[in-house]
Image: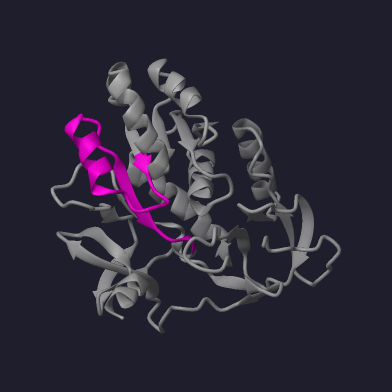
Amino acid sequence: MPLSLSAERRLDGHRVTAIDPSLPAAELIASVRERWDRHETILVDSASAPVGAVRLDLGSTDVALLQRTSGTTGAPRMFAFERAAVAAHATATARAMEVPSGRRVAMAIRAGTAYYTSVVLMSMFNDNALVAFDPLDIDSAIRAILERQIDTLDAGVRFWQTIAVKARRNPAIIDALADLSVRGVGGDPLPPSVEAHYRQNGTPLANGYGLTQAGPNVAIGLRPSAKEGSCGRPLDGVECTIRDSELMVRSPFTAVGEVVDHQLVALSGTDDDGWLRTGDRARIVDGEVVPLGRLRDQTRAAS
């Protein structure tokens, strides 16, 4: 069920404004920028977010963003991010993707997810023109690619799988994809067959790793790697290590806390040194993060 935030609730705290993620891209950027400039706390929710003003008790923290998880790896949760961390994460993401200001950044991502929000905020802080496609409207995205109307494209795994099928019938799509400076993929693990397909066609995908409470972006592999399944190196300022097969992340972009029953509480899963448990198995090879699946999947297979 969607996490309901009653507009009638009046707690001492920050003014929180929910953003409608279904807005056209230009309106979305303008709406987020307006609220950012007014120092409001922005709520982004992928599951029927209420649009309008609500109030939460966020204490004295400078919370600028509330991001609800999609619930794909468990019950939906909502994480709070401080203003400085949000801006720094957007800048670090643009740097990792080598996207200069003025570029036409496109996405075909489920509205309201952390991946979606990261592209929106990167575009806003980096002065990029944002183009948003419905992830199910593959043909519109293909037209934009063929007509060279966009410079980068971020999308989910299924989107890229469908593009690969259509490109077999129309080789011009592959030529046009090669002109994109970034072909980003995220949200779900990238199957080796899909990764190999795009690599063999000279249009490798930029695979990334992240989780909502970490910013969300942890690592981005902009260039092809010799390591199958690699998600590239961590963003500037982000540290990764392995403990008992689990990937641990320490990042300046990590959430300051989690919203539970309209209250901001301490973020669970972090130790005294700021290392965040991800729940994912991984290897780190030559500085690159190579995810191996969820820890709970390993436990289930062993039982």
> Can residue 258 be seen?
yes
Q: State the residue lying farthest toward the front.
A: 303
Which corner quadrant holds the C terminus?
bottom left
269 vs 57, nearest the viewer? 269
Query: How many labels were placed on the picture?
Result: 0
Q: Relative to 172, is 31 above or below?
A: below
Work out whether residue 223 can be spotted.
Answer: no
Q: Residue 64: percent from the left, percent from the top?
A: 62, 58
Residues in magenta, as a range: 184-212
Left or right? Give the position of 197 relative to 122. left
What residue sits 54% from the left and 62% below the top? 71
Q: Position of residue 235 (x, y in %)?
A: 33, 55
Q: Residue at x 68, y 63 (%)?
A: 3
Where residue 299 appears, x then y in whole percent?
32, 77
Using residue 168 as the reference point, say whether residue 225 is left or right of it.
Answer: left
Residue 256 in the magenta stretch? The answer is no
Residue sitting at x 40%, y 22%: 145
